Image (cartoon, rainbow, N blue to C red):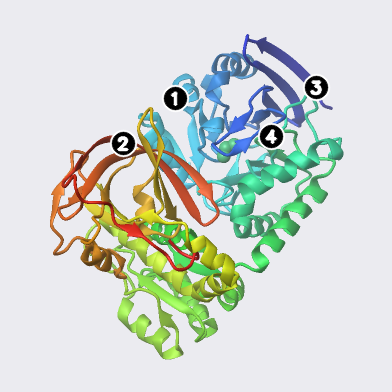
Amino acid sequence: MVAIINTNQTTNTTRLTLQTTELAAETTAIRCLDWDRDRFDIEFGLQNGTTYNSFIIQGEKLALVDTAHAKFRQLYLELLTGLIDPASLDYLIISHTEPDHSGLVKDILALAPQATVVGAKVAIKFLTDMVHQPFEHIIVKNGDRLDLGNGHELEFVSAPNLHWPDTIFTYDYKTQILYTCDAFGLHYCDEPTFDEDLELIEADFEYYYDCLMKPNARSVLAAIKRMDKLAFETIATGHGPLLKYHRAELVDRYQQWSQAQTKTETLVGLFYSEDYGYSEELARAIAQGIIKTGVAVELIDWNNTEPQEVRELVTQAAGLVIGMPPQSDREAHTILSTILAAAHSKQSIGLFEAGGGEDEPIYPLRTKFQETGLIEAFEPIIIKKSPNQATKQLCDEAGIDLGQWLTRDRTAKQIKAIDNSLEKALGRISNGLYIITATKGEIKSAMVASWVTQASLTPLGIAIAVAKDRAIESFMQIGDRFVLNVLAEGNYQNLIRHFLKRFPPGADRFEEIKTVPATNGSPILAESLAYLECEVSNRLECSDHWIVYSTVQTGRVAKLDVLTAVHHRKVGNHY
Ligand code: FEO
């Protein structure tokens, strides 16, 4: 039987209400209804508000699955403490750590310091940084179980990238409810707890998929495969109505959309270990670089996969990246043999050490792949000490190199596809010539730019177009600082020639280049005509480029009587 209790709070600006529903045996949903929220993340406009759903499971042990957005702090905590005694809470299960679900974790732990937090390894790490206090925890992997007693045996499903790296689903064998947090959710705020009326919710369901899940379509398919063996009757999502009446239809739509999305993708299979050395850290940095080039990445943990799955992936993949497993890991060696047997000469390969102390030697493996005819996309990444910013930048750039290699034909085709007269007409748009230089921690980067323009007067601001697969893109996130060096007419060839060179991953772009440090720490090129010190305050995604808007703090011109170098292009298919 389903019981529904509502509590309300209306302020002048927003309506926040709570709904409590008995979902099944010893299982209660607390839905925080945010009726007027009109934006989620920077790009996600909402028409129908949203809800944040949290769940109580009472076996012999008591568990809470997720919390809520901090804006519900008072309402949620009052309601929760009326439903349970926090001192008896045994487990706080974290499906993922984005603040709309974990915004009250610190509050819950203050009320229930004895509770054990259950989550993926990445989630526990994020939470440690977030709550700044010690707490008991259990790290769970795909297939791990937790028995709450009284039939409530929970099984965890690893669902990385749906849509954060730390996502897990939780399945309760007694109630056949699968708790999926963001996955299969929708931003839709209304009284019905369930999905009775498909027509009412399907547009928002699809919009939500497009915004949050489509970029990770491959991870969606992997999660659906893992869910398959669980006989779930209800999907208890973290946003919107819970899926019961149209559960199968809606999961099927996720599958179809994701299959269509992945069909034409260029794919890299990246093998790493969640538990060994720095493997995961480096794998994620390499993956980030690959993704910048528009190539999809599937991350596979050596100890969380099967030979059949690996065979299929390696057969499809255009590229492979291998993070060395430990020599003693027999499971990983079986997977490695499968990879070697399925790899083929049209593929590209990159290898990296995991730095765990007993890595499988990298060079014999490199030789084996080379003998099979695979093309090496980047030199093996060898770890001499724990990874720092420079190591991660090197990995990011290695990933970009691999992605650019795999997309070289597509890029050439796109360039050729521009109609000749259009190409020439576009080429008549001219800009100045500039070099952006930036420092982050101990590492520096640079890029030749010509799409640069003053964008605002108060405050003084400029806009720059940066291709998504440029290494400097990671230095131009909101809050980052850099220098725009303006090049001088008649004196720019040497600098342009130098900075247009293809640098190997991690290479120092400033070797033999005269610079002085700016106030913000970035290098000013001694030969530049003028410079501006800037701070990124906004980014607009424009297809294959980011338009980066930055405020300007200070600047100086070296020679008042010299003009800015101008880039006169013949064609409009590049800047
Ligand atoms: Fe609903 Fe990714 O948080």
Q: Alpha-carbon distance for marks 2 and 1?
A: 47 Å
The C terminus is located in which quarter? bottom left
Q: Alpha-carbon distance for marks 2 and 4?
A: 38 Å
User: Could you classify mark 2 by the number of other residues whose Cα lies within 10 Å: few (under 14), some (14-19), or many (20 or more)?
Assistant: many
Question: Quick one: 488 or 176, which is closer to the camera?
Answer: 488
Q: Is residue 40 left or right of residue 481?
A: right
Ligand 1 has an atom within 8 Å of the beta carbon of the residue at disc 2: no
Tag 1 residue:
113
Question: On residue 333, which mark appears?
Answer: none
Q: Is residue 268 left or right of residue 548?
A: right
Quarter holding ligand 1 = top right
Disc 2 or 1, which lies upstream in sequence?
1
| Count of labels in the image | 4
**Tag 3 secondary structure:** loop
465 shown above or below 96: below
Closer to viewer: mark 2 or mark 1: 2
Q: Alpha-carbon distance for marks 2 and 3?
A: 58 Å
Tag 4 residue:
187
Closer to viewer: mark 2 or mark 4: 2
Question: Quick one: 269 or 335, which is closer to the camera?
Answer: 269
Q: Alpha-carbon distance for marks 3 and 1?
A: 30 Å
Disc 2 or 3, which lies upstream in sequence?
3
Question: On residue 552, which mark appears?
Answer: 2
Disc 4 or 3, which lies upstream in sequence?
3
Label pair 4/3, CB-CB below 8 angstroms: no
Q: Alpha-carbon distance for marks 4 and 1?
A: 32 Å
